[in-house]
Image (tube, rainbow, N blue to C red):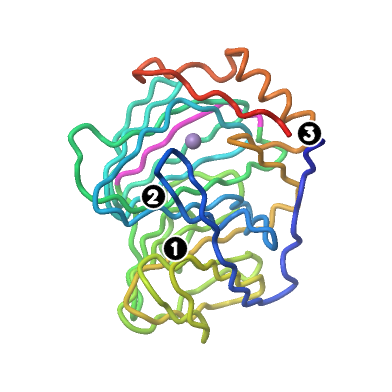
Amino acid sequence: MRLEPRTTPPADGPAMDLLPARNAEIAPGVTVRRALPHRHRRAVGPWCFLDHFGPAPRGALDVAPHPHTCLSTVTWLFAGEILHKDSLGTEQVIRPGQVNWMTAGRGISHSEELAPGYQGPMHGVQLWVALPDATRFEAPSFRHHADLPVAHVAGADVTVVAGTCGDVTSPVATHSPLVAAEVRLDGAASLPLRVDFEHAVLPIDGDVDVDGEIAGVGTLVYLGTGRERLSLSGAGRVMLVGGLPLGEDLLLWWNFGGRSDAEIRTFRAAWEAADPRFGSVDAYDGARLAAPPLP
Ligand code: MN
């Protein structure tokens, strides 16, 4: 069976689609809510993957070295400590309020474990950003940002993970115009949006009123394009993501991003053959993951 690239065109204006996340087991005993890709919405701007994990009272995480291609992975925590190691030689602990932005480009491999000694709760999101055709085979890179700017608006504090909210801009470099923000609500807030972006909101803590619709944990609220502002009210946190529609067909399979069946087969064969394009995570104590069989 051939793998087919898929896309869903951006809404031609404002939308209000409540898309239920599905449960996915990312490791034995570790279940996450997968909001993207959704069968009715493959991506929001360049954001093509969105997992929400926890809150769990005791963190448990040990994802052995595995590859990525043609995308950036973004880790953002609300609670917990994760130790990231990659084939560039990076070893980085990430904590709440910090972002790990790893760009796979032509190929990288990494592992994710609980930070040594950490025994507390775990709660966070992992997102993938599809790289545009012009840069998707660039050299891999890893960036950790410990200090991100906060926009204070009436009714909310907004940590700008990437892109811009109002007059506050994140230092994170991106490959296409996009935004990601953690919004901590304390009442009713109105956030400025870019009208040419697609946007979506993911409730993190509980029910939130999103422009008149109540949405809870496990629901991605797709907002379409063409909005100048977003009204939110409640007492919890949400993640806001958005960006210029990518306008390219995407194919995601396992941890690979690509454009065609042939590309994915090439990436998989290269990983299974320990091709140097993916390097090796020498600091990880254990075996790397094997790719699953192709359909
Ligand atoms: Mn990964």
Residue that label 1 marks: 239
Q: What are the residue bounds of the magenta stretch?
A: 137-146
**Residue type, mark 3 in image:** Asp
- Compared across the picture, whether 40 is left or right of 72 comes to right
Measured Cα–Cα span from mark 1 to mark 2: 10 Å
- Disc 1, disc 2: CB below 8 Å? yes
Q: Which residue is mark 2?
A: 76
Q: Residue type at mark 1: give it.
A: Met
**Quadrant (top left/top right/bottom left/bottom right) for the N terminus:** top right
- Residue that badge 3 annotates: 261
Foreground disc of the pair 2, 3 = 3
Above-or-below relation of 47 to 115: below
| Residue 225: x %, y % from top left | 66, 70
SS at mark 2 in the image: strand
Q: Is residue 33 left or right of residue 294?
A: left
Q: Nearer the viewer, residue 28 or 62?
A: 28
Dot 3 or dot 1, earlier in sequence = 1
Q: Position of residue 194 (x, y in %)?
A: 58, 68
Within-10-Å neighbours for mark 2: few <14, some 14–19, many 20+: many
Work out whether residue 24 or residue 45 is closer to the camera in this orientation and state it: 24
Within 8 Å: ligand 1 and the Cβ of disc 1? no
Looking at the image, the residue that sits furthest to the bottom is: 212
Disc 2/disc 3 C-alpha distance (Å): 31 Å
